Image (spheres, coloured by chain):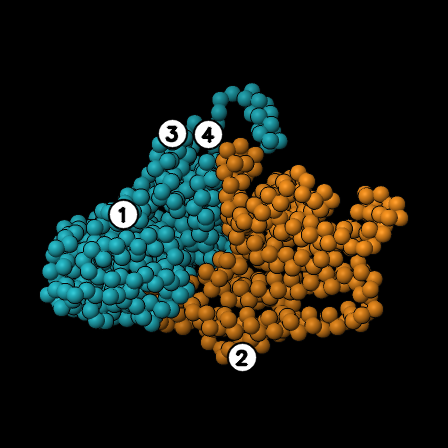
Amino acid sequence: MLRLTLSRLVSLAVTLLAVSLAIFLIMEVLPGDPAAIMLGTAAREDTLAALRQELGLDQPALVRYLEWIGGILHGDLGQSITYKMPVATLVAERMNVTLPLSLLAILISTALALPLGVAAAARRDGPVDRAVLVFSQLGVAVPNFWIGLLFILFFSTWLGWFPAGGFPGWSAGLWPAFQALLLPAVALALPQAAVLTRVTRSATLEVIGADFVRTARAKGVDKGGTLRRHVVPNALIPVTTILGLQLSFFFGGAILVENVFNLPGLGRLAYQALNQRDLVVIKDIVLIFSGLVIGVNFLVDIGYALLDPRLRGRS
Amino acid sequence: MTKRLLTAALLLSVSVIPAFAAKTSLVVGMPIEPPGLDPTVAAPVAIREVTWVNLYEGLVRIDRTGKVQPLLAKSWEVSPDGMTYTFHLQEGVKFHDGSTFDSADVKFAFDRARDPKSTNAQKQIFAPITAIETPDPATVVIKLKETSGNFLYYLGWGDAVIVAPETAAGNAANPVGTGPFKFKSWTRGDRVELVRNADYWQKDKTKLDSVTFRFINDAQAQVAALKAGDVDAFPNLGAPELFAEFQKDARFKAVAGNTEGEIVAGMNNAKKPFDDVRVRRALMHAVDRKALVEGAYSGFGQPIGSFFSPNNPAFVDTTKVIPYDVEKAKALLKEAGYGNGLSITIKSPQMAYASRSAELLSAMMAEVGVDLKIVPTEFPAKWIEEVFKNKDYDVTIVAHTEPLDIDIFARDSYYFNYKNDTFKAAVAEAARTTDEKARYAKYAEAQKILAEDVPALFLFQLPKLGVWNAKVQGLWENSPIPSNDVTEVSWSE
């Protein structure tokens, strides 16, 4: 178990380093001069040069890369070019939106998918199964931002139950903040829930057909007991894998959903920073997103070992 | 639902209080969030739309009709030779941090903007200045090296607001000015909140106690926020196709005005075939501006024939100089040697007005035998790199939003690659001329030269589609300068 954890940690660090280099190189070749974007088309050449110097853009690429990585290792994410404030502060502010949003979406998605998937598999081709298949087919086909737009039209503009976007901040109270996050979280969760439902259904079906389940039934364990004790625990392994992979979709999807609902989260910050070529912010956010996804997959790996005793001995 | 019940309960309990006091808070929606709140160190329009005359004030200001009015300078004299400006300052003015405003602050602010290390986006405003003297705390004397007809006007811009030496460096995150509103908070990505400045030098000038600017980029979300009442006003709505809906709705006031932005399809004048004026004229003849406005901006937006805002008193209508005329376009192309067709590209950024216009232009060009291929590009980053800096393009399309920027056609290094000495001389003389009438005449001449020479396809003025709660009064209909001046806004009861 310890060896498994250690080897996974080393590969995690190596992956992050490779990611940082890739981001840096991509931002180098991406056209766009942050100084020219800040100062617009009327700026004179000497003004542009002054700003480039102020931003440190006149330094060679290697120096800038090392300074960036060195800063991160010291816990300094650098200064945003456009906002002129520490990226760490910006990111912390935005995390307050994106993290609860993603967690809420994961919660909703799992809470929908697991029962639906198992219920569908338990009575294959029954009415529940049919309904679940239609729901999941729709969910996979419809993009989250479009669901978001429909939600706004229906729940905000028409019924007036929810704000039409924006985020009052946690300081405004738990309920208003939760209210602002609920619709986007559902919009974000539905497509992923659909995928997860299908995976849960097929994983459960596969296990139901296995010999040991038939044996359990033959021994006289009732249907519900077989499902609980033998089928679901075994079906959870592929489901956990998919859930881990989906996490990147939750963060990626947050970019679109946060834009539609006008939520000041990390996704929207990333989008704005890319538009404005706020290189420092983009690089940091991509690294943070990558770190989160890699970190979660690390946890999923460890999670397997806990779910599947056979994996504990291997490294 | 709970919110509704709460509101209902609140209304019931409040209704006992006699009469309804008018609301004193305002929520203004803006499409783009400003990057920082200091208009003296960066160009984006959004910075001015939050801060100009709300937070910061200049010696003078531009009013809603585009005219120069006194502000921190209560009066001024210009020497007979036009080279010395003496400003008499308002007394008893305080910055938001409590420090006193005087002539030393004016000198500091302008010297900071002129400094070699300054990153002021409109440094040319300060280029004619040779010396700034402060004979006493209430007087500033500015000496110029040449006469400047627009000097006072430029001092009304956001780039020339007065900042204090103690606080200037931190203004981007924590703005300190002399305006009627003070900075309260900025939830990045969402809103900036301002509150009434109780010590403002013009007592009782403003009726609002607080103003919140909310940043909503998506056009659909803007409409939803207005309809849900989350936002009281959207001075510049991003969805022209939904604007008419608001015009019919009695709860809202929907006003179509003008901005300072000209939408033009710039051509690379140094490159074949655009170096031939006959080709440029032919392409202009091929454009049906009215149909373009209809298709690209739902019919809002005034067609233009040159590069000057209809808000400006020196504006002349030049749309008749090269009118829509397919036959003439074909004849001119034939004369220039392109009778058998011509194949060119247009680099079109992602903004809705640009990509829609590019598609329409492409269809109109096809009518005269020109194959105009659309090449998408990304604004601002990629466009600035490819088109603006490297001049790697045939035709492109953007809105130029700076006020009084006709001189961009006189700049040698500008992306149009346009060189016309007669035009340059006319613009330079207009800029030098201090007599108003003579200056307007010179600008009229410059406009006509551009209309005939067509260095760019002049399409239409970017409209300002304002939508606000019908009870909100005092917002600007046009924007002769990028701003959301809320100093005269109030709610009717």
Q: Amino acid at mark 2?
A: Leu
Q: Nearer the viewer, residue B33 or A116?
A: A116
Q: Which mark is residue A62?
A: 2
Question: Which mark is in front, 1 or 2?
Answer: 1
For the residues labelled 1 and 4, the Cα–Cα distance comes to 39 Å
Q: Which chain is depicted cyan?
A: B
Q: Nearer the viewer, residue A25 or A78?
A: A25
Q: Amino acid at mark 4?
A: Ala
Answer yes or no: is residue B438 visible: no
Sequence order check, earlier mark of 1 and 4: 4
For the residues labelled 3 and 1, the Cα–Cα distance comes to 26 Å
Position in image of residue B154 (x %, y %):
30, 57
Q: Which chain is depicted orange?
A: A
Q: Secondary structure at mark 4?
A: loop
Sequence order check, earlier mark of 4 and 3: 4
Q: Which mark is residue B250?
A: 3
Q: Is the residue under label 4 in contact with that under label 1 (CB below 8 Å)? A: no
Q: Which mark is residue B293?
A: 1
- The quadrant holding residue B350 is bottom left
Position in image of residue B265 (x %, y %):
27, 59
Q: Secondary structure at mark 1?
A: helix
Circle 3 crowding by C-alpha within 10 Å: few under 14, some 14–19, many from 20: few
